[in-house]
Amino acid sequence: MTSSPVSVELDAVGRDFGSFTALHDIDLQIAAGEFAALLGPSGCGKTTTLRLIAGFDSPSRGRIRIGGRDVTDLPPNRRKLGMVFQNYALFPHMTVAENIGFGLKMAGMGRSDIEARVRRMLDMIHLGQHGDRMPAQLSGGQQQRVAIARSLVTEPAVLLLDEPMGALDKNLRHTMQTELRQMQRDFHITTILVTHDQDEALTMSDKVVVMEGGHIRQVGSPEDVYDRPSSGFVANFLGISNNLPAVVTGSAGDGMAVVDLRLPGLAPLPTRARSLGLSGPATLSIRPERIALADSAPGAAPGTVVLPGTVTGHVFRGSYHDYTVSPGPQAPAISVYEQARGEETTPRWPVGHPVWASWSAGAQNIFAIDS
């Protein structure tokens, strides 16, 4: 059998628990060597999906294929998978080297071959001098590296990661995200990560699979799902979005719609936005970092939104300033992020200062209300 360019495929896979449907007949393809993140809130079905791929649970319907081979009815140990859990699951009575080589020993590999592979893995995870240590003598980040090495040393077809960085502090988590991503590229191994951390999914993956209520809501590159979300749910789950009342009045061609912003107390502001084939009342979404502030009204290109407002709040968040701007007493306030410049820690626009907010039509998205 020739290997498939699709490493993992779910074909109409569903999972029921009695009368409750945890997974609604989803279709998903993950290419060989791709890093995919299953992202969504608690109860969205991402962990159920991972368990089905791993063989820890069986689907109520549908088929699962790995490398073109149907594994739906195979037990976990026959799927050629590696898995890393949040708690690492290292054997406390074994040394680091013994932990890494455990799977090879169970497979019946000779001692010299095991030692050679383990040495190679220790060097790759920068723990070459720690092979004789016990897991309790390692830091959290080092333990995670050992858990990853133990999964990779058996040369699995797919690596499954079940929120493996949830127990790490913020700085270490960022470091390990970079290291894990580099290891994945070095091994060119298909990897599936389950996470509820939006930054983690956007930072690490080639493909983001956004899930809600047992459904897949959008699949795309990190840039696609962030800049071109398919629904209000996706836009709001992946970061912060300003959601403003609007009315779709027509089509502007090229996938764009003619939209009027209907902010209370202000005349309708005509603009354009990416269209999903909507008409009538809708919600216009714009990211805070896509909005610019100025002391005077900027020159507006066709379709650009320009509106006056007043700064009603400010928070310094280290790398950027977070402004709250009110376009009027009855209009919803908008959030605006501005990158901090150099050592600048004081806001350019204090609370109470009048400003003009503007953004490009191409940065907007339009959604059905409550989508």
Image (spheres, rainbow, N blue to C red):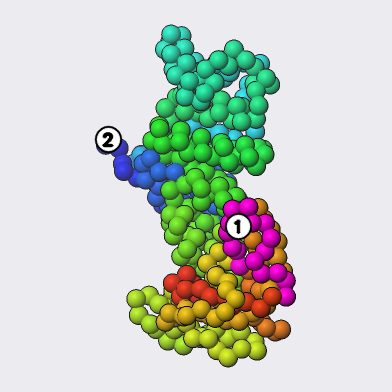
Q: Earlier in the sequence, mark 1 or mark 2?
A: 2
When the figure is inspected, residue 220 is found, relative to residue 76, above or below; the finding is below
Residue under label 2, please give it: 1
Displayed quadrant of residue 8: top left
- The residue range painted magenta reads 336-352
Left or right: residue 151 compared with residue 133: left
Q: Amino acid at mark 2?
A: Met
Q: Amino acid at mark 1?
A: Ala
From the image, give the main secondary structure of the stretch colored magenta: loop
SS assignment at label 2? loop
Residue denoted by label 1: 340
Disc 2: CA contacts within 10 A as few (<14), some (14-19) or many (>=20): few
Where residue 120 appears, as percent x and y from the top left, is 44, 19
Magenta-drawn stretch contains 340: yes
Q: Determine the CA span between mark 1 and mark 2.
A: 56 Å
* Residue 108 visible in the current orientation: no
- Tell me the residue at 43%/48% (across/down): 206
- Using the image as rendered, state which of residue 182 and residue 248 is in the foreground: 182
Residue that lies at the very extreme toward the front in this rendered image: 343
Which image quarter is the N terminus in?
top left
Question: Quadrant of the image for the C terminus?
Answer: bottom right
Q: Is residue 114 magenta?
A: no
Q: How far from the left and from the top, in percent, is residue 322?
A: 65, 63
